[in-house]
Amino acid sequence: MIVALESFYRTHKYLVDHVSSPVKRQLMSEIDRSHRLIGIKGCRGVGKTTFLLQYAKEHFGADDKSCLYINFNNFYFTTHSLVEFAGQFYIQGGRTLLIDQTFKCEDWSKELRECYERFPKLHIVFTGSTVMRLIEDNDDLKDIVAVYNLRGFSFREFIYSQTGKTFPIYSLNNIIHHHEEIAKEICAQINPFDYFQNYLHHGYYPFFLEQRNFSENLLKTMNLMIGIDIVIIKQIELSYLSKIRKLLYLLMMSAPAAPNVSQLSKEVEISRATIMNYIKYLQDARLLHLVYSEDDVFPKKPDMIYVHNTNLMHAVNRDEVDKIAERKTFLCNMLNVNHKVNISLNNADFLIDRQLRFSYAPKLQNGKNNSNIIYAVDDIEVGAKNEVPLWLFGFLY
């Protein structure tokens, strides 16, 4: 076991020494490190592995052997349990274990629980797919794990990656009441429209920074989300993979729209109940947003289905993405991070936190707006009163 640990330490040192990301994720400063078991959930492509390595680099450095990064892609774990490995690491002074690809460990939740109980000074930070239940329906972990969500880049983070300029996060309440001053402060330093369309096309997933074709890479990532994060983790028969892919394509090409479940059932050739389950899995994988009326939840049919983010829209529809659909998708995605998003029944697009009504507007309303609605207005640098620049909602996180 000692020889095996040394090989892991060498890999850890190399990866931490060479980890590179121009953006420090906000989540790094939000984590409460006093928790002994921390789960980092995120969809494929948002940078969970990079986040773990940056966590090691920032808090420990590459040479501190009290911290170790491991990845369950390593075939070593086909014949050795996590508890066995963690025990040896703990005996040799290890105190922080960073675990990637956790779902590839058989009985991963039971093993994490046993590590938590057997090694009282051991801290574990592990990554998980968004489809994994870390608290809900998980009796092994729900009373001991602290769960955080790592999301794709916000527009604010994308601007930093392009310019090196740091801007603060603004709360929704701050944006609503002080958007004119905030927008003027930002626009005094940058022109947001120099970056906004690029963000909508390829700025959400950090791998746009890599020297690879972004759209092809994103399509590959989407297929892994379906093939692994849904089919394998949810234990769906492989023969249904093509049906899930077809369902996703049909929904994405019509979104945002109310789903016709009966028509989808006929086209995909699976039952209505199965269609609804698959739609929920596609939301869990962060491929779709399901937006409901105020008091409705799954398994009811959503009122509207949105694509999760605009990058996905551009990857799938290579011809031309509808501008209004693109802008509404951006607004939905940004608002959904820290707020409850429902369909509004009163001439607005969204009801936020059961009290605020929001609508996308392609241009200023010139005094013809509804004072009870907050308008996210396209193509303006600075707004006025209840007309807020659409791009500014990209500074919510």
Image: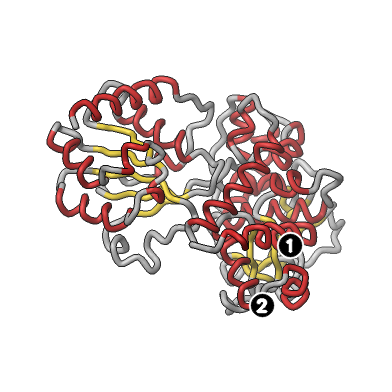
Specify whether residue 252 is in view: yes
As helix, strand or loop, the secondary structure at mark 1 comes to helix
Where is residue 249, by image quadrant? bottom right
* Drawn side of residue 150 relative to residue 244, left or right: left
Crowdedness near tag 2: few (<14), some (14–19) or many (≥20) residues, C-alpha within 10 Å? some
Crowdedness near tag 1: few (<14), some (14–19) or many (≥20) residues, C-alpha within 10 Å? many
Specify whether residue 33 is in view: no
State the residue at coordinates (57%, 74%). 298
Residue identifier under label 1: 251
Location of the N terminus by quadrant is top left
Where is residue 219, by image quadrant? top right
Where is residue 145, by image quadrant? bottom left
Say if 192 sits above or below 135 in the image: above
Q: Nearer the viewer, residue 354 or 277?
A: 277
**Any mark on residue 272, and which?**
2
Type of residue at label 1?
Leu
Q: Nearer the viewer, residue 189 or 91?
A: 91
Rendering coords of residue 162 (x, y %): 64, 27
* Drawn side of residue 89 relative to residue 99, left or right: left
